[in-house]
Each structure stands twice: as C-alpha cells, then as structure tokens.
Amino acid sequence: MDGHSDVVVVGAGIAGLTAAALLAKSGLRVQLLEAHHQSGGCAGTFRRGPYTFDVGATQVAGLEPGGIHARIFQHLGVSLPQASPLDPGCVVDLGDGRPPVQLWRDPARWQAERQAQFPGSERFWQLTAALHRANWSFAAQDPVLPPRNAWDLAQLLGALGPANLASGLLVGSTIADLLQLCGAAGDTRLRRFLDLQLKLYSQEPADRTAALYGATVLAMAQEPLGLFHLEGSMQTLSARLEQGLHQAGGQLHSRHRVTGLKRTAGGPPERCWQVEGLGPGDRPFRLQCGDVVLALPPQTLPALLGSQLPSGYRQRLSHLGEPSGALVLYGAVARRDLPAECPAHLQRAWDEPGSLFVSVSREGDGRAPAGEATVIASVFTAARPWFELSPEAYAARKASVQAGMERGLRALLQLPEQPWLHCETATPRGFERWTGRPFGYVGGLGQHPSRFGPFGLASRTPLPGLWLCGDAIYPGEGTAGVSHSALMACRQLLAARQQPLVLT
C-alpha cells in the first residue's frame, strides 16, 4: 500500500477510531492503520468457544445525553450502541467484614450510602462534588489543555468560568489533601475506599491522584452522568466508530504495523510526513500525508522518529514515569454458582496479587450462553519486570498469580472450589502482543498533579503536523477520556487547516 492522504492516524483503539472518524467527517482523506486484526485496542474483545471476553475496558462513560460519546456519534450520524446504566456502578468490598460500599446511580441514595459507610465525611464529598461540577462545565466547552500556542490558549480561556478559577487554586493538590482540608484524613476506611477506586481510574492512590481529576472520577457513577454496560461486548463501541469512519469515506487498514515516521524537508506541505510500516505478510508500505495523529503511547515516539525527535522532547518523554501493566483472569462459570442478584462490577481489597476489579456478564448480554456468565478480574501490576523473567520463572509466577486471583474471586463471589467452565490469565506479555504497546502498558500515565492538566503532555507536539491523542493525553484514560483527547487533537489539526470543528 503506497499513496497519499491528508491524514494518517496510527492506532485503531477508541482514540484513533474517534480521531479518524471526526477528520473524515470534516472532509479529509484519512487512512487509519492498525497492527492488530481488529480495532478496539484495550477496549476490544476476543472469543473462546461460546464466550466473548472484553480484553480490558468493561464499562463505558459518556453515553448519557451531552456525554462525549453521545455528542460524537450524533456528529457522525451513527446510532449509540445498546447499553444499560449500571446501578450500582460498582460494589466495593473493603475486606473488613463490613457491608460493601454500593455506588448507587441516584445521587440521594449514594449520599445516604456514603454517610452510613463513612460518617463525618460529608464535607469532603460536598467539596469533591463542587469541584466535579466546575470540571464538567469546563469540559463541556471543549478546552485545549495544556496550551502550546495562541489558538490553544484562546480555547482554554474561553472554557474557563469563575468556578474553574476558584478550583484552579487546588491544581497542585491531591485527593488526600482534600481529606486533610475537610477534617476526614483520620478515617482509614474512607481512605482505603478512595485508594481502591482512584487506583482503578487514575492508576494512583489518594495521596498521588490530582484533586481535580479525582473529584470527577468519584462522581462518574451518579446521574446525570453514569457508567454503562454495553450489550454484546465492548467491541460494539468500536463498530459504531468504524461505521462513522466508513460513512465519511475514511479507510481502516488492519494488520498494518507502523515502524517509522519521517518528516520530509522541501516538499509540499500536504506531503510533509512519510509513514512506513509492514502490512499483511510483512509487505512494506509507505504513505505520504500532511498530518499524522498518533494514538499510541508516547513512549513509542523515540523508536518511530529516531534522530528526528528533538532532544528536549525526548528528555521529556523519558521522565513521564512508568505506566502500569495488568494481570487479567478471563473465566466462565455457571450462573447458579454466583450470588443472587450479582452486580455487574465489583471491587475487592486483596493482597496477592493485588486488589481485584471484577466484571460479571449479565444474562442475555451476548457474552455467554444462557445460564452461564463470564467473569473478568483485573489487577494492576508493574509491567517491565514480567519481561525480565526466565521462561520457567514466568510460568511459575503466572500460575501463582492465577491461583491468587481465583482465591480472591471465591471469597468475593462465594464460588465453589472448582467453578470454572473456562479459565485463563493474561499478563503484560500478552497485552504487548495484543495491543503492540511497549511492555503491554494499559491505561495512561498516573494522574499525579505533576502530570495532570496544565502540567501534562500536550496533544500538539514540537514537530509540525504530528499530533497525539489517547490515554496519556488530557483528560486521561477510559473510553470517554480518550475520546475527549481525540476531539481536542482534531480541533487543533483542523484549525491549522482553517477548518473549524464544533460538536453540538
């Protein structure tokens, strides 16, 4: 495959699919390149016999009216995937013998729940709610953050309101700082709950999660927002975005792995970038384009750009910090072995290999035959050490991890000793093969105050015509977060071409 496009988008996860579809809808010639045989990335799926497993992401935000997915699908002219709101959004077992915490969808019911579970903490929850409202009104204006030129700065300033200027005083604070400010720092049970929930969405505990990021994470399960369970599988989200891309004339090329990006000098601006890689059968391909949108982790840039990467930017990338990997157990059980009215999403404090986030399929949702259910349990882990193990040590560690996760699931779900109709475990090595991400990284950068918002990595790079989107770019991970980042990069790219992009 050789040729010329206006834009080449690299990586067909949710961010790349969103960017490619929006740019094609704006009339640009778009080629979307994906190394895997299917789109979706960490929000994709795979099958084992009669079972469909969501690879990584198992719940979706942003499908509510005015949410980022709802706005994007309306703009693309495609229907929303079938989904049902999660109520509760999650059930969190702190492992202390007390009733688990239920994140109810109704705000009043959630207020009663948290007051019963964490008495004396309401000042903290009211403060985070106020910060969340300020954040949400800010995000609805589609800001550019962090700004890198006058146009970016104008978009940022236009999105700011009085509440944002006030909450900006906390831009360097953590959720733990808010606890201290509200007199709730001594509540160890509340702190344990916050550490579990924040680690799930920000990859950091309360004392390392930016207050402005964490405030919205803690409010995502309640109306008028909410977390949603997709019918069929998570792949339906990708399928809708693919539909929007194809309707707008864009093209998706699977099994096309990009190996190099080159900025050419002296040629016309519409051909200033050359994208090289290997297609099916390892056949080389080369594309020329005016812009490249990279929806891969920014840690891939040094290898893709080589000596063209500016030294200062290379140094910035080297100090981003180490993202997490994941250990994931994919299982299937008879539904009769699960508790009655088993919730779709649960979290359990657990020591080895770590706290579990568990997703259980619903009857009739397309993931398992009637009377059966898929059970997916995930744990964050340091990724790089898994690649340093000998084959023997790797097999032993993987078996130990699976045994520990099975014990945790039996404790959480009251499963019998041998409940599994199917059971397998993935490590960062498997995620590297599936996603092509270095060391099988999942999620983006931990949302520490030093890496969030104005201090984060910008979508606009120092190399003209090279843009970033995905979970390492503001506002962070999750399908809603990466879609916001894709929209931001597309607005910047199109503004440089004198083409506005406005979603209703």
Image (spheres, rainbow, N blue to C red):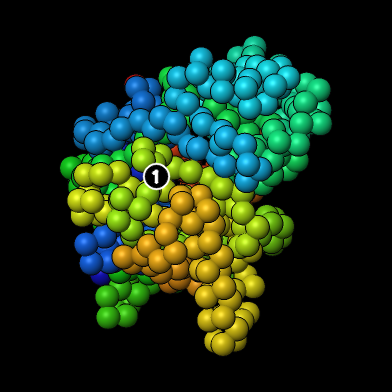
Residue 26 location in percent, x, y?
Answer: 29, 37
The crowd level at tag 1 (other Cα within 10 Å; few <14, some 14-19, many 20+) is few
Side of 222 relative to 31 (left or right):
right
Which residue is located at x 36 percent, y 37 percent?
Answer: 341
Q: Amino acid at mark 1?
A: Pro
The residue at the far top in this view is: 162
Residue 437 location in percent, x, y?
Answer: 49, 64
**Above or below, 127 relative to 359:** above
Which residue is located at x 46 percent, y 50 percent?
Answer: 413
Q: Does residue 245 show up?
A: no
Residue 455 location in percent, x, y?
Answer: 69, 40
Side of 149 relative to 470 (left or right):
right
Residue 422 location in percent, x, y?
Answer: 33, 66
Give the residue pinned by disc 1: 339
**Quarter occupied by residue 70:** top left
**Above or below, 165 relative to 234:** above
The residue at the far front in this view is: 416
**Above or below, 281 relative to 119:** below
Which residue is located at x 30 percent, y 73 percent?
Answer: 279
